[in-house]
Image (cartoon, helix red, strand yellow):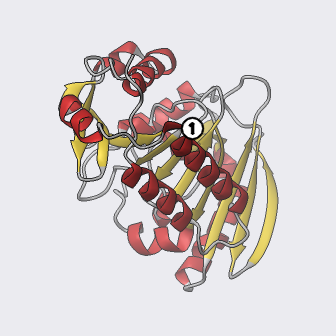
Amino acid sequence: MKKRIINPIILLASVLLIFSVLSSCKKVGAELVEETIEETAEYGVKQGARKGTRKFFKEVAERSIKDASSDIAARRLYEQFQKHISKEFADGVVVRTSKEGIEYVSKEFPTSAIRKNGNVIVGKAGSLIDNGPVNEFFNHLLPNSKYVVDDVFIYETDKLGRVVSCSADRTKAFVNLAGKRNPQRNSNVQKMVVEKLDGKVGFDDAGHLFSNTSGGANELINQVPMNADLNRNGLWRQLERGEEEALQQGKQVCSYRKLLYKGDSKRPYAIEFISEIDGVVSKTIVQNN
């Protein structure tokens, strides 16, 4: 059996990226960032740097993840896709190399790509005006993972693949991404959010955890089934407007969300909405009735 190989440069870059995502958010999300850095560093120490890294890159370039599954890391990821997403999705993933390391890319959707180190997954959300469709890897989530999206947003999933917490430097997202997201919401993704995540058809919207008008992603990772009134004009929308107004005023805004579930349901019954605006933290529990 081949030993798993990890590029120390990529590992270091991942740690620095995660640290920089919320470096200006001194309070909100600090524990999540610290845990992510510790786990990524621990993974690197356990696996170590191998001399065969370049050879491995050459071996797996442009091969399907199934064909590359003689490598233990690729095989485990292929098995995860099969178990938690679908065999069709797993068989449609290609392993390729880039300057940033090993990437997993969808054959059907070439703009859908991620890089993975241990349980940390890094990638760019789609639905940008100049970048075509959504990133399908963020519509089908792996369990027990931490996702770093657009170098700004961090999402954590549990053993069921549910997003249980997320955090972001909203000011960075607003400056770099606001106005670049396609203003037309993806109706297919929104339908999938409600149907796949135990939503109530005709009652729920696909509510964004971080609003797309201020740079939030349009993929499933950033949406949950949410009471339509709550999402459009209720308490959730009021809290969103508070953050959006602060962003428009040039204030430093950091956000954290904690999603609460009952049993194995994928629809949160409540979400803790935490904002840090110019260092002042506010917390509100929003009931998703």
- Residue at 60 percent across and 40 percent down: it is 224
Q: Position of residue 254 (x, y in %)?
A: 63, 69
Residue 191 sits above or below residue 41 on the image: above
Residue 55 sits above or below residue 222 on the image: above
- Residue at 39 percent across and 34 percent down: it is 188
Pick the quarter of the image with the N terminus: top left
Query: To which quarter of the image does residue 197 belong?
Result: top right
Q: Count of labels shown?
A: 1
Left or right of 20 on screen, residue 246: right
- Residue at 41 percent across and 43 percent down: it is 49
- Residue at 63 percent across and 30 percent down: it is 199
Q: Position of residue 60 (x, y in %)?
A: 23, 30
Q: Amino acid at mark 1?
A: Ser
Residue 255 sits above or below residue 99 on the image: below
In the image, 202 versus 279, the foreground residue is: 279
Left or right of 98 on screen, residue 203: right
Whether residue 107 appears in this view of the structure is no
Whether residue 67 appears in this view of the structure is yes
Label 1 belongs to which residue?
145
Left or right of 143 on screen, residue 13: left
Disc 1 is placed on an element classified as: loop
Q: Position of residue 59 (x, y in %)?
A: 20, 29
Q: Residue furthest front?
A: 51
